[in-house]
Image (spheres, rainbow, N blue to C red):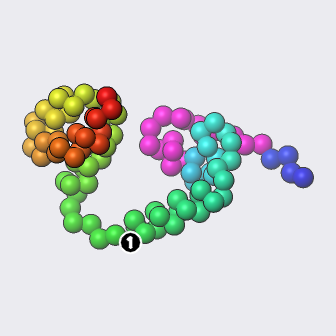
Amino acid sequence: MSSEINSTPTSTTGADAVDEAIAKGIDLDGSPIPSAKLDLYHQVMALEGQRQRSGVSNTMRSRIVRIGAKHISQDELNNMLKNADFAELKEKEIAFYYAGK
């Protein structure tokens, strides 16, 4: 039986930390990520990698809304989107990201 020691990623903040952990197959707490979870993740990411893209602005806005909603109030995020010349929050986004807040 191997006495392999898992090491945690060098940082546990930011998206890069998650990508690094996935690449190593080790969760942020140092525990191994089950192979079934890694396999499914890689399968879905391969599909996403083949998807035709139509433009960067829509993807940027989607990421801003998805991540911004975790950190920024609805009114503030909506104003930030508007000031950056993005479309304001849609009703379905408000319902999904802010309904329970």
For the image shown, how many numbered marks are present on the structure? Answer: 1
Against 5, residue 54 (above or below) is below
Location of residue 58 in the rendering, given as x and y in whole percent from the top left corner: 20, 55
Quadrant containing the C terminus in the rendered view? top left
Q: Which residue is mark 1?
A: 50
Q: Residue 62 lies in magenta, yes or no?
A: no
In this picture, which residue range is highlighted in magenta?
A: 5-20
In the rendered image, which quarter is residue 84 located in? top left
Q: Residue 4, relative to residue 13: is it above or below? A: below
Q: Is residue 89 above or below residue 56?
A: above
Disc 1 marks a residue whose amino acid type is Gln
Location of residue 59 in the rendering, given as x and y in whole percent from the top left corner:
26, 54
> In this rendering, would 58 be left or right of 9?
left
Crowd class of label 1 (few under 14; some 14 to 19; many from 20; radius 10 Å): few
Q: Residue at x 13, y 42 (%)?
A: 88
- The residue sitting at 55% across, 62% down in the picture is 40
